[in-house]
Image: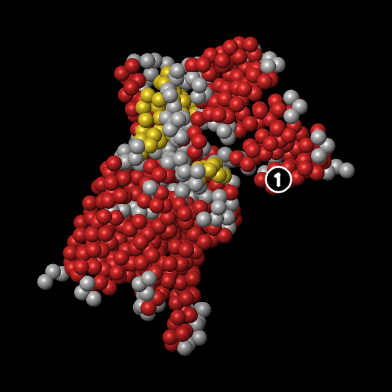
Amino acid sequence: MINEDKIFKYLTKALLAITLPVMLVMAMDAGISGDEYFHLNQAEAVVNWYYSFGSDTSALHTPQTNLKYYGQGFDNAASLIARVFNIEDIFTLRHLMNALAGWLIFLFIVLLAFNLGGWRAAFFSIILCILSPRLIGHSFNNLKDIPFALGYIAGIWFLVKWMREWPLISRKTMIAMTLVIAFTISIRPPGLILIGWLFIITVLLLINDYLLNRTTPDFRHPIWLKTLWVAISGYLLGLVFWPFALLNPIKHPIISHQLMEAYPVTIRQLFMGELMWSDMLPWFYLPWMMMITIALPVLVGFLLFFFTGFWKSSKKRLFFGFIVFTIFFPLLYIIFKESNVYGGWRHVLFIYPPMVVLSAIGISRLWQFLKVRKAITARAVLAVLLLISIIHPIKFMIINHPFQYLYFNQITGGYKGAFGKYEADYYFHTIRPAAEWLNDYLNETGEEDLIIASNFETAWFFRHNDRVKEHRQTSWHNRSFENWDYAIFSATYLHAFNLNPKQWPPLETIHTISVEGKPVCVVLKRETLYDYLGWKALRERDYFLADSLLNLATTVHYGLEGAWLNLARSRYQLGDHYSAINALDMALEIHPTFEPALMEYARISFTLGNPEMALNLLNRLTGYNKKYLPAYTLKAEYLITLNRKNEALAEIQRCLDIQPSWQPARKIFFELTEY
């Protein structure tokens, strides 16, 4: 007779053993994530702070990045290792360390699933881990969310052990829990949540003892000493590699946590086909993004868990209830607090590992249900359905490596169906292969003294290429305002209109990086410098030269919205107002939400005696971008001129509701309310 449990045991261990080297090798191909440069620079500053015994305080002055408020212990550790062992390729080191952290998440998922559901649940859990493209993709280069998720699932694992050992908690479990709390806090201030879970569990178990034994809970119980020792020790250890927190171990972590809850940096991103600010997203942003990007087997298994009567098991009810709480409480807290979130659901990536555990248990229980009823055919059908369901995520990961984090499931029609509706590459992973291709291309052409432009930092990828003399970072819409020979642009933070096949990839494209046939990143060879030279002439107020150059630029390349905008500006200065409007119409045909063009159009319309047209254009602009503050003040100025001061005041109040410190709006507000 086949011992099913042994089969699941050996398969689980084999898959765990295989996934470690595979993830390490895969991580070697990863690009640099959108935040890595910032965190690397901060990590170097932190290491310098320790090396200089506190005299180098650059780690404590981060007005632009706010990174002093992060522990970012994992980043700091990577930089320390690189410093000690003189490792030049810091990004490869970081990515390998992060891949190891990702694999450890797999390990704790399997341990927890085995602890609560046996080897069958453990087997399904490692299968579901492998079917987690976004988790795997972030394991390559996301040194914030992956280590934090590792700390969180490890914390849940040791808290379950704490409950199992109650009330005789072993020293081993206490030390492990202390280290896990320290590790998680060192990554981010919200790691304090593990201390909260520890106290909640202790209280619940004391109450449970009372209900079972009918004895008054003694809050002087020795367990409280153990709990306090673990909490305080873990908290203090978590601050060791965090300079800002060390300067005031009580006040500064609290300040940091408050900042995390209301993070000041907001990003405008594509969601459901519209560009939205991250602090103005609908409440369902996180659950919806999870629903369309998590592989269907994980979602189905998670739902199955709640339909298999987990609450009926008196022995495991507390464990399951606790894990459910650790998933839903953070998610609901973020939703109700209307926290600033962006980049898909990476900010709640830490709740995904416990979801995988419950999903595996849900599938395992269904398997057991069918086994007990000797439903051989039904089990065979279930096995076939599972095999079929893994095809979509596995195929995506194999074909589109190393862009696993861009996975969308069948609800959106995969990545192909999501392109132009959701962010195409919010962490800029596609920049690396584009840069590597361009490196090879430049070596073949033999060109010298080149300038590379991009909407991401590219210097690292060309550090061994002497043909490149300069790198410039610019947005897609500002490409006409910069001098460059070649450019690399990821389809990141672009409006859906800009990503339609008529405009993207652009005409000057010489190479594309595609995912499911969609061009996510493009390499451009500049066709003309007339647009940039025209912009230079415009800045120097040589309007005749600017008009001539920009006219040539738009003739050579119709799709340069920036050149059309500057052509309109030059013609306006030359007094050719209607020709300027024609140029703006062309710019808005290319990009209907091009904000500078709408502003310029409004100014010219008002000058030509068409104030309603001007106001409509500004209303259109603030409808597209609620944070385009100059549009509010310009509207207010026009309304004041039209003697519509109440409407002007309403516009200024709307502006100040968005940004209370916006000085032009404050000045107008005081002028309107002075008397």
Report which quarter residue 81 is drawn in: top left
Name the foreground residue: 434 vs 513: 513
Specify whether 607 is left or right of 72.
right
Q: Residue at x 37, y 78 (%)?
A: 312
Q: Quadrant of the C terminus?
A: top right
Residue 20, horizontal then vertical, whole percent: 26, 50
Q: Residue at x 35, y 45 (%)?
A: 404
Relative to 25, does residue 438 appear above or below in the rendering?
Answer: above
Q: Which residue is labeled 1 in the image?
A: 654
Colour option used:
secondary structure
Report which quarter residue 276 is drawn in: top right
Specify whether 58 is left or right of 490.
right
Residue, far left:
1
Residue 376, horizontal then vertical, whole percent: 19, 70
Residue, far right:
675
The answer to whether residue 526 of the structure is visible from this angle is: yes
Q: Residue at x 83, y 43 (%)?
A: 673
Secondary element at image label 1: helix
The answer to whether residue 162 of the structure is visible from this angle is: no
Name the foreground residue: 242 vs 460: 460
Name the foreground residue: 225 vs 551: 551
Q: Residue at x 35, y 58 (%)?
A: 298
Amino acid type at circle 1 is Arg
Assess disc 1: are there few (<14), some (14-19) or many (≥20) residues with their C-alpha within 10 Å of its C-alpha: some
Residue 493, horizontal then vertical, whole percent: 50, 38
Q: Quadrant of the N terminus?
A: bottom left
Residue 483, horizontal then vertical, whole percent: 50, 20
Name the foreground residue: 427 vs 154: 427
